[in-house]
Image (cartoon, grey):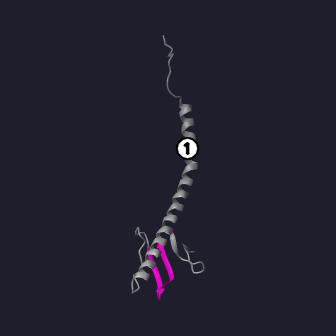
Amino acid sequence: MFKKIKNRKGFTLIELIVVIAILAVLAAIIIPTVSSNIARANEARDLANTRSAYAAYVVELLVSETAPAAPTIPDGTGTCSVTAANGVVSAFSCVAPTGTYGLDATTGEIKKLP
């Protein structure tokens, strides 16, 4: 009456559910790691752009005889403000998507400002 199927190929429902569960666990581990790496990369990009804008402003300040206009961040994602007198930059800051970066008065380096 019923023929036995001797050559059964494929996966059972339980096997497919186990594979999907394993993939879900892996995704739950990977997604927070990737998102934190993206956030750190964005902060590093904004810091590099601020350093580049500061360097461009200092070069322009040294080369030109008049005080140049405040620089812009190279990729256009933020605005900068500068205070300079007698060819010396006393304050420099740029507002970027990930925060405010600028010249630290104590160390003289460009870093993220509080």
| Rendered residue at 48%/65% (across/down) | 45
Name the residue: 43% across, 75% down: 56
One can see residue 97 in this view: no
Query: Residue furthest toward the front?
Result: 63
Horizontal side, residue 73 vs residue 90: left or right: left
Q: Quadrant of residue 21?
A: top right
Magenta run includes residue 49: no
Q: Residue 72: horizontal and vertical position, in percent?
A: 41, 74
User: Which residue is nearer to you in this view: 38 or 24?
Assistant: 38
From where the camera sits, is residue 91 visible?
yes
Quadrant that contains the C terminus: bottom right
Q: Circle 1 is placed at which residue position?
A: 24
Magenta segment, principal secondary structure?
A: strand
Residue 23 rendering spot, x and y as whole percentages: 55, 42
Residue 92, image x and y in percent?
49, 79
Whether the magenta-drawn stretch holds residue 95 is answered as yes
Residue at point 44% right, 78% down?
59
Residue at the top extreme? 1
Where is 105 relative to 4, above or below? below
Q: Secondary structure at mark 1?
A: helix
Residue interval drawn in magenta: 79-98
| Image side of residue 18 versus residue 3, left or right | right
**Which residue occupies the foreground of this view, 98 or 51?**
51
Image coordinates of residue 27 in percent, x first then y, are 55, 47
Q: Is residue 86 above or below residue 16?
A: below
Give amino acid for label 1.
Ala
- Residue found at the very far bottom of the displayed protein: 86
Residue appearing at x 49%, y 13% in the figure: 3
